[in-house]
Image (spheres, rainbow, N blue to C red):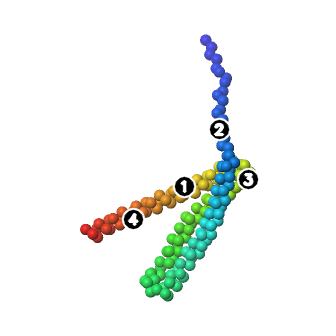
Amino acid sequence: METTENDVQPTPTPTPVLVLTPEAQYYLKEIGKWANFLGIVGFILCALFVIMALCIGAVFAMLAKFSPAYNALPSGIFPVLSVIFILFDVLYFFFPYYLYQFAGRTKRGLALMDANEIAQAMGKLKSFFKLWGIVTIVMLCIYALEIFIFIIIGTTLHG
């Protein structure tokens, strides 16, 4: 008894193609403009924050001339504050960085009608929102910890 094999190969299912309507392209173009603006403003704020972090010692020294309360601060706190501010600035830098990259790739992708460039732009937007989400979760955890500490301190002081 002979068996014959079927030489028919299954046809691959076509991958769906996403086509952006003119309205969606308009929205992406507008989003790109705002993301570009917010990215540039964010970079400027980063630069100002670094300047502020580097000058914090001089600012508090000037404030100490006007208010004796600032003289009570230990002098070693200013370099620590500068480092903390710079670390926060490094974290903050990534927010405008991802927005700016999203804006540039969106503009380029729409101009060239390049789906890969639009996909990479969406990846940068995803990174922005992922970072925003992680920072939000960390802040919520810090708030919850603060509330817990205040409750513990409040109950021990009261009772």
Q: Which residue is mark 4?
A: 146
Q: Name the amino acid type tagged 4.
A: Glu
- Disc 1 and disc 2: Cα gap in Å? 27 Å
- Among numbered discs 2 and 3, the one appearing first in the sequence: 2
Q: Looking at the picture, does residue 159 appear above or below residue 104?
A: below
Q: Which residue is mark 3?
A: 111
Q: In the shown orientation, is residue 74 left or right of residue 153?
A: right
Q: Residue furthest top?
A: 1
Q: Name the amino acid type tagged 3.
A: Ala
- Disc 1 and disc 4: Cα gap in Å? 24 Å
Mark 3, residues whose alpha carbon is within 10 Å: few (<14), some, or many (≥20)? few
Q: Is residue 105 visible from the viewing direction of this image?
A: no
SS for dot 4: helix
Q: Which residue is mark 2?
A: 15
Q: Which residue is mark 1?
A: 130
SS for dot 2: loop
Q: Is residue 139 visible from the viewing direction of this image?
A: yes
Q: Looking at the picture, does residue 2 appear above or below residue 89?
A: above
Q: Please report the residue visible at 59 percent of the width from the left and 75 percent of the height from the top.
A: 51
Q: Name the amino acid type tagged 1.
A: Lys
- Disc 2 and disc 3: Cα gap in Å? 24 Å
Percent position of residue 36, x then y: 65, 61
- Disc 4 and disc 3: Cα gap in Å? 49 Å
Percent position of residue 19, x then y: 67, 44
